[in-house]
Amino acid sequence: MRTALRCFSLLLILAVSSVVHACPPSERAALLAFRAALHEPYLGIFNSWTGDDCCNRWHGISCDQVTHRVADISLRGEAEDPIFERAHRTGYMTGSISPEICKLTRLSSVIIADWKGITGEIPRCITSLPFLRILDLIGNRLSGDLPADIGRLRRLTVLNVADNLISGSIPASLTALTNLMHLDLRNNKFSGQLPRNFGNLRMLSRALLSRNQLSGSLPDSISKIYRLADLDLSQNQLSGVIPSWIGRMAVLATLNLDGNKFSGSIPPSILVSGISDLNLSRNYLTGNLPDVFKSQSYFTVLDLSYNNLKGPIPKSVSEASYIGHLDLSHNHLCGPIPNGAPFDHLEAASFVFNDCLCGKPLKAC
Ligand SMILES: *[C@@H]1O[C@H](CO)[C@@H](O)[C@H](O)[C@H]1NC(C)=O
């Protein structure tokens, strides 16, 4: 009798614990519906999605340890995923992202990255996931707009939809994402202007928006983003002047404005700032190269090629503590190339196609 009772309670404990540890059936159903809208024919990443407990060894799924609700979807088609690293290959997946994932209301990260063939829109309902911190959909073929109410995702720290076919303007509500640290919209079809209050994104450290069709000028509010370290707006249709406040931003280290329609002169401040990677190539910049270089001027890249700069290369350039890659080609510069440390290693390609530059490494004056 006693043994029977003990057996019974043991069974009860087992039964209760397996119920507690399994993912809720509704979440399992949502995941299976999500999977049904996708087609991954080569690697079988979904083969592990069997059994009742989606929290247990389903590839790419992890659950909250306490609530056992699905917390993360992390499916990467890139080699950095251990499965692919072993197989020495990358993945390919077609289909679309089912709105069923919005039923997983405890999701904190959604990473469906680098599958190359996933089409359709970002489900509108994604903005109703109140705990979402990371949305990373890089490297697919997603189209349509970003949801207009993306600003509802107040906890979002990472928004990465780079390398897709997303069009439309950057939603005004995006600037309500005051926890956003990493914004990557590169290589899509975004058009229109940057929101004027872009600077409300106070936590932003990387703003990567290159290779879109953005137009208009740089919003002054960007100067308020104190943590901004990397601003990449290259290969858009941006115009207006390059504001001098950009050289006074506290931690800005990389500034890529190349391949736009910026005009006016180069603000002296950006040549004596913390910016070490500066590309202003292929714009309509005019005027002289400011004669302000100092020991603070430290450049791994200084690319000013394909503009309309005139006058001499200033003597102060030799005051710069370092210039790794310099490109002044395709301008209207004239006069002797100064000698000194930053020039010793440079080749003619850095200076060709100007009006009348001369001296080493070009021909003597
Ligand atoms: C600077 O930008 C131009 C135009 O987008 C690009 O061709 C060039 O490679 C860039 N320079 C460097 C050093 O990356």
Image: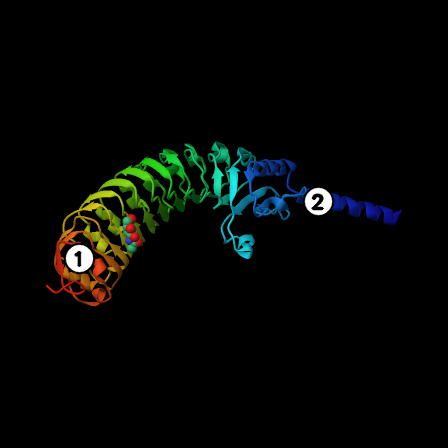
Residue at the spot x=36%, y=44% of the render?
A: 202
- Can residue 236 be seen in this snapshot? yes
As drawn, the residue found furthest toward the right would be 1
- Can residue 133 be seen in this snapshot? no
Camera-nearest residue between 211 and 267: 211
Please name the colour scheme applied to the rendered image. rainbow
Q: Secondary structure at mark 1?
A: loop
Camera-nearest residue between 105 and 54: 54
Name the kind of residue labelled 1 in the image: Val
Q: Secondary structure at mark 2?
A: helix
Q: Quadrant of residue 163?
A: top left
Q: What numbered label is drawn on residue 18? A: 2
Mark 2: give few (<14), some (14-19) or many (20+) Cα within 10 Å: few
Camera-nearest residue between 178 and 324: 324
Place of residue 93 in the rendered image (x, y in percent of width and height, measured from the top left): 52, 42
Q: Quadrant of the C terminus?
A: bottom left
Place of residue 167 in the rendered image (x, y in percent of width and height, measured from the top left): 38, 35
Mark 1: give few (<14), some (14-19) or many (20+) Cα within 10 Å: some
Q: What numbered label is drawn on residue 74? A: none
- Which residue does the numbered mark 1 point to in the structure image? 292
Residue at the spot x=59%, y=46% of the render?
A: 44
135 versus 99 height, above or below? below
Place of residue 115 in the rendered image (x, y in percent of width and height, measured from the top left): 49, 44
Residue at the spot x=49%, y=34% of the render?
A: 123
Left or right: where 182 falls relative to 270: right
Q: Quadrant of residue 28?
A: top right
Name the kind of residue labelled 2 in the image: Ser
Place of residue 144 in the rendered image (x, y in percent of width and height, measured from the top left): 42, 33
Q: Are marks 1 and 2 in contact (CB under 8 Å)?
A: no
Left or right: where 285 falls relative to 151: left
Left or right: where 19 falls relative to 186: right
Left or right: where 70 falls relative to 11: left
